[in-house]
Image: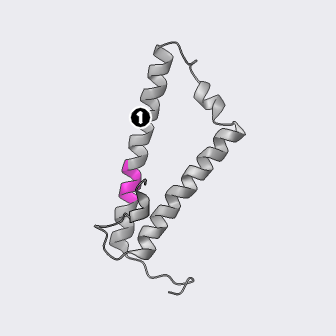
Amino acid sequence: MNLLQPSIDVQKLTAIVFELSSQLHQERLHRLALEAALVRAGLLEVGATTKLASDPAVREASRQAANKSVDGLIRVLTEHDDERAPLRPNDFPA
């Protein structure tokens, strides 16, 4: 494979974009619901999560999680021709 001119499977790329969009929407909804529940219970002040987002430890944990997610997507794109089987045996906990 030429890294300067990669072959692109448009269908696979489109499917991944739509899957990521769906996951992003679900994650956002769950985050907002959790934040609202904590605020309603008096356990969190409104806007506290926005303040925490600039915390270096939180940002580093977020960066590591994003890298792990992207690594998994790249592995699916590069290692397996059958999109029905994206998971590998090492994706499951022992």
**x and y, in percent, of residue 10 in the image:** 37, 73
In the picture shown, does residue 3 fall above or below 34?
below
In the picture shown, does residue 87 fall above or below 33?
below
Q: Is residue 23 left or right of residue 74?
A: left
Residue reaching furthest to the bottom: 2
The quarter of the rendered structure image containing the C terminus is: bottom left
Question: Residue at 40% of width from left, 35% of height from top?
Answer: 29
Q: Residue 52 versus residue 65: which sits nearer the camera? A: 65
Residue reaching furthest to the left: 84
Q: Residue 10 versus residue 20: which sits nearer the camera? A: 20
Question: Residue at 46% of width from left, 69% of height from top?
Answer: 75
**x and y, in percent, of residue 3 in the image:** 56, 82
Q: Which residue has dot 1 on it?
A: 30
Q: Is residue 63 left or right of residue 79?
A: right
Hey, which quadrant is residue 49 in on the image?
top right
Element on which disc 1 rests? helix
Magenta residues span 17-22
Question: Residue at 42% of width from left, 59% of height from top?
Answer: 91
Q: Is residue 88 left or right of residue 71?
A: left
Q: Main secondary structure of the magenta part?
A: helix
Question: Residue at 45% of width from left, 27% of height from top?
Answer: 34
Q: Amino acid at mark 1?
A: His
In the picture shown, does residue 87 fall above or below 81?
above
Hey, which quadrant is residue 80 in on the image?
bottom left
